[in-house]
Structures are given as structure tokens and as C-alpha cells.
Image (cartoon, helix red, strand yellow):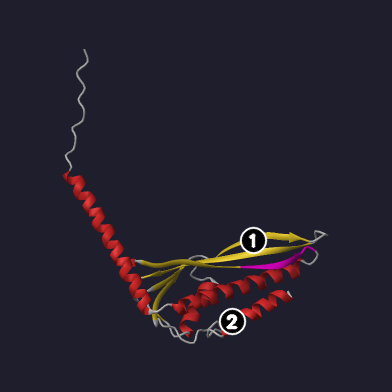
Amino acid sequence: MIKRNLLVIGLATVLGGCGFQLRGTQVDAMSIKEMDFSARDVYGPFTREMRSLLEHSGVRIVGGAPYKLVLGRQEENRRNASYNGSARASEVELSSTINYQIIGRNQRVLIDDHMDVQKIYLQDSSNLAGSDEEARQTRQEMRRDLEQRLMLRLAQLKPEQLDELQAKADARAEAEAAAAAEAQRVQDNTPQQSPLELPPAQ
């Protein structure tokens, strides 16, 4: 518990220097001032908190904005990391992942990435209520960590970077469309062989 608390305090100190606050996870200024937003888990806590963090960081959530943040479903895995000698308590490792995309104009995917975090808590079979509370707090901390990391990633994005990614995505799509059209043209101009006719049976 002490180690985990020290880790959280250390993370708060580092992120504080980047304009973050552990409570509220607020960014002083975002270069992107307008963004569309959607998520698979529409009513989940991660979605609600990310929307709130974006708005409090000066980002207007507007349908039809040039760029759209799309959150995937938050996925969690759990495994036993170790046991103590009495086998009454064990270290449990939780890992949580959130996939996200930045979608540009014409539904072009500009960024397709993920954030993940791992934490360990102690599960004591002789104190199930305490272990459940420990697990709940650990999951809450992990969700905040994911929010902090994603907000930091978004804060690093500049409009000119997204414009460059949009131009590359448009060029790639145009090249693929041209290649497909050329392949179709070649196929249309290629004489079709007549089916092989077998001689009549004697």
C-alpha cells in the first residue's frame, strides 16, 4: 500500500509539472480547441470523465468538427501475481487498456493507438471486504492514470500535425482508389477466354 501511494504521489508530481492536476486531471491549455467525441461505452465512467476533462481544458465538443476522438471499450485483465507462504493472501495484478482513434475529414483514421496501465494489490482471503475495497480503489486509480495519459497525449497534438496526417491519409486513399481503378480497367480490357468445349461423346 505504501509503495503504491508513493507511486501515485510521484506520478502526480511529474504530471503536475506538465500542467496536470491529479484531482481533475486538468490541462492548462489544449492546442485543439474543437473536437467531436464518441465512445463505445457511452455511459461509462471513463467516457463521462474524459468528456468533462476535455471541456474543462478548453475543448468544445462539437458534432461535425474536423477531428473526432473515438474511445474504444476499456478492457481489463486480472491475474494472480504471487502467493504468500500461508496461501491466504496473494498479489493480484490488474491491467487496463483503452483503445482510441482520431478520425479526420472523410472518415480518415489519422491516429489509431492505445493506452495501458498495470497495478498490483493484495487480496487477503481472511478479509474479503477489505480486499474488495482495495480492488475498487486500484481500479479507480488505474482509470485516472489512463485519463491522465490520454489527456497528456492529446495535449501534445498540434493542429498542424493533424493537418499533416490528414494530407497523408487523403493521399494514401487517393492512391489506393487510383490503383483499384487501374486494376479494374486492366481487367475490363483483358479478353475473356472462351470456355473449353469438349468433343461430343462417341
Task: Please tell me whether residue 149 is drawn above or below residue 175 in the rendered image.
Answer: below
Q: Which residue is found at the position 51% from the left and 71% from the top?
A: 43
Q: Between 118 and 132, which is closer to the camera in this rendering?
A: 118
Name the residue that disc number 1 marks: 78
Q: Give the SS element for disc 1.
A: strand
Packing grade of label 2 (10 A; few <14, some 14-19, many >=20) is: few
Q: Position of residue 69 (x, y in %)?
A: 42, 72
Q: Is residue 200 visible?
A: yes
Q: Is residue 116 above or below residue 7?
A: above
Q: Measuring from the top left, give residue 126's x and y in whole percent.
A: 81, 64
Q: Look at label 1 and name its amino acid.
A: Arg
Q: Residue at x 39, y 73 (%)?
A: 68
Tell me the element at label 2. Answer: helix
Q: Quadrant of the N terminus?
A: bottom right
Mark 1, Cα crowd under 10 Å, few <14 / some 14-19 / many 20+, is few
The quarter of the image holding the C terminus is top left
Please give left or right for residue 171 compared with residue 90 in the image: left
- How far apart marks 1 and 2 lie (CA) works out to 27 Å
Query: 63 or 93, which is in the foreground?
Result: 93
Q: Amino acid at mark 2?
A: Val
Relative image position of residue 93 (x, y in whole percent):
67, 64
The magenta region covers 118-125
Residue that badge 2 annotates: 14
Residue 42 forms part of the magenta stretch: no
The answer, for residue 105, to whether it is visible in the render is no
Task: Kindly indicate the quadrant of the structure image that contains residue 199.
Answer: top left
x and y, in percent, of residue 191 in the image: 16, 39
